[in-house]
C-alpha cells in the first residue's frame, strides 16, 4: 500500500528514532538489576532491529487487512525484511544455545527446560489473553457469544503446538497477534533437539558444516517451505564454531557486517535459496566478533529495547490491530506520509508497552524460574 521508494528510509529512520528516544535518561530504570551480565550488548541491539523489522513487516499486512480485508503485503521489501528478521532470530537462538551446551560436560536438562518455560510461556500466555480480549470486544461479546472453553485453552500453549482456533466466531483470529507465535513452535522444536545436538559437540565444526550441507542441498528435495528455517539454525551453530577459531578486529567485523547487509539489499537473495545462508552466516559471525555498525547497535536505546525484543515481537498485534481498526477512516483517507507517521507513533507506543511487559511480566518470571531448583 505504501510507496516503495519511501519504505527503506521510513523503516530505518523510525527504528533509529525510537532507539534514540528510549536511550534518554527517562528510561534509565531499564539499566538497573541486569540479570544476565554475560549477554552480547551488540546482539541485544541486533535483536531490537530484527524485532522492529518484523513489526514494520506486519504493519503493512495490517494496513492491507484493514483496507482490503486481505492479510498480505504488496511490497516485496516488506515481505523480505520480515522473513530475514525471523531467520536471524533463529540463528541467534542456535548461536547462544549451541554455546551453552558446548561449555558444559553435563547439561542440567531439567533446569534448562524449566528456565525456557519460565522465559517463554508467561508472556506468550499474557499476549494470547490480551488478544482474546481484543477479539471478544471486536466480535460483539457477550451479545454475540459462540465462545468455547476449548478454543481459549488452545491459545494458551505458549506456542508449543500453536493451534489457535477462531475465537467467538471471528474469522482468522490470529491476526490479533499478527500470527507471530508460529516461530515459538520452531524455537521449542530446536530446544527439544538440544539433547541430540549435545552428542555432536566434540566435533562441533564438522557437525555444523554437515548440518549446513543438509539444509542447503538435501532438504530442498523434500520441502520448499521450511528449509530456510533449518538453515537459520545451522548458520547460528556454524557462526559459533567459526567465532571460536577466527580472530578479527571489531573494525574488520563491522566492515564484514556492512558488506553482508549491502549484499542483502542489492542482491535480495530469495529466502529459500542457497544464496541467503552465507550472508546470514557472515552477519552472525561479524556480530559474534563484536560488530555493532560502528556503535549503533550498542546505543543505550537499542540495547534497552533489545532486552525487550521478545515483548516487541509478541505484543505488536495488541497495539497494531485495535489501533488500525480505530484509525480505519484515517488510513483510508490519509496519504503515505500520514500513514507512515501513524505507524511510527504506534511503534513507539509498542516499544513503551514492551518495556512495561518486560519489567512486570518477563523479568519477574525469569527470576522466579532461576530461583526454582529442580
Image: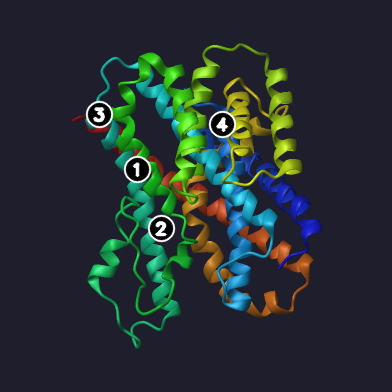
Q: Residue at x 40, y 45 (%)?
A: 186
Q: In what element is the residue under mark 2? A: helix
Query: In x, y percent, where is residue 78?
Result: 66, 56
Residue at position x 42%, y 53% in the image:
182
Picture coordinates of residue 368, whole percent (x, y): 29, 38
Between disc 1 and disc 4, whose residue precedes?
A: 4
Asked whether, in this view, residue 231 is left or right of residue 366, the answer is right
* The disc label shown at residue 300, or none: none
* Residue at which label 1 appears: 188
Label 3: few (<14), some (14–19) or many (≥20) C-alpha neighbours in 10 Å: few
Residue named by callout 3: 109
- Gap in angstroms between the C-alphas marked 4 and 3: 25 Å
Quarter occupied by residue 153: bottom left
Q: Is residue 195 above or below residue 62?
A: above
Q: Is residue 366 visible?
A: yes
Label 4 SS: helix
Label 4 sits on residue: 43
Amino acid at each position: 500500500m505504501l510507496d516503495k521508494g519511501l519504505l527503506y528510509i521510513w523503516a530505518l529512520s523510525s527504528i533509529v528514532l525510537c532507539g534514540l528516544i528510549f536511550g534518554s535518561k527517562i528510561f534509565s530504570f531499564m539499566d538497573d538489576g541486569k540479570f544476565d551480565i554475560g549477554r552480547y550488548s551488540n546482539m541485544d541491539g541486533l535483536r531490537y532491529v530484527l524485532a522492529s523489522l518484523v513489526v514494520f513487516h506486519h504493519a503493512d499486512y495490517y494496513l492491507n487487512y484493514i483496507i482490503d480485508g486481505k492479510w498480505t503485503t504488496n511490497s516485496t521489501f516488506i515481505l523480505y525484511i520480515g522473513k530475514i528478521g525471523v531467520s536471524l532470530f533463529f540463528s541467534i537462538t542456535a548461536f547462544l544455545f549451541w554455546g551453552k551446551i558446548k561449555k558444559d560436560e553435563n547439561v542440567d536438562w531439567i533446569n534448562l527446560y524449566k528456565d525456557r518455560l519460565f522465559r517463554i510461556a508467561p508472556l506468550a500466555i499474557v499476549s494470547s489473553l490480551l488478544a482474546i480480549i481484543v477479539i471478544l470486544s471486536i466480535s460483539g461479546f457477550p451479545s454475540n457469544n459462540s465462545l468455547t472453553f476449548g478454543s481459549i485453552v488452545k491459545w494458551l500453549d505458549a506456542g508449543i503446538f500453536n493451534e489457535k482456533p477462531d475465537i467467538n466466531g471471528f474469522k482468522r483470529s490470529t491476526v490479533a497477534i499478527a500470527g507471530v507465535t508460529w516461530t515459538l513452535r520452531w524455537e521449542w522444536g530446536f530446544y527439544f533437539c538440544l539433547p541430540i545436538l549435545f552428542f555432536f559437540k566434540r566435533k562441533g565444526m564438522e557437525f555444523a558444516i554437515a548440518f549446513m550441507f543438509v539444509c542447503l542441498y538435501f532438504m530442498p528435495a523434500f520441502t520448499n517451505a521450511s528449509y530456510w528455517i533449518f538453515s537459520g539454525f545451522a548458520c547460528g551453530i556454524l557462526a559459533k564454531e567459526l567465532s571460536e577459531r577466527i580472530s578479527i578486529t571489531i573494525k574488520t567485523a563491522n566492515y564484514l557486517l556492512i558488506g553482508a547487509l549491502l549484499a542483502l539489499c542489492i542482491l535480495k537473495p530469495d529466502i529459500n535459496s542457497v544464496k541467503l545462508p552465507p550472508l546470514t552466516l557472515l552477519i552472525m559471525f561479524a556480530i559474534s566478533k563484536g560488530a555493532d555498525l560502528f556503535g549503533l547497535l550498542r546505543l543505550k536505546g537499542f540495547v534497552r529495547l533489545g532486552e525487550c525484543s521478545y515483548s516487541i515481537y509478541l505484543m505488536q498485534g495488541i497495539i497494531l490491530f485495535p489501533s488500525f481498526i480505530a484509525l480505519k477512516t484515517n488510513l483510508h483517507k490519509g496519504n503515505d506520509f500520514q500513514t507512515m507517521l501513524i505507524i511510527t507513533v504506534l511503534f513507539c507506543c509498542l516499544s513503551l508497552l514492551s518495556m512495561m511487559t518486560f519489567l512486570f511480566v518477563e523479568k519477574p518470571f525469569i527470576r522466579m524460574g532461576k530461583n526454582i531448583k529442580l
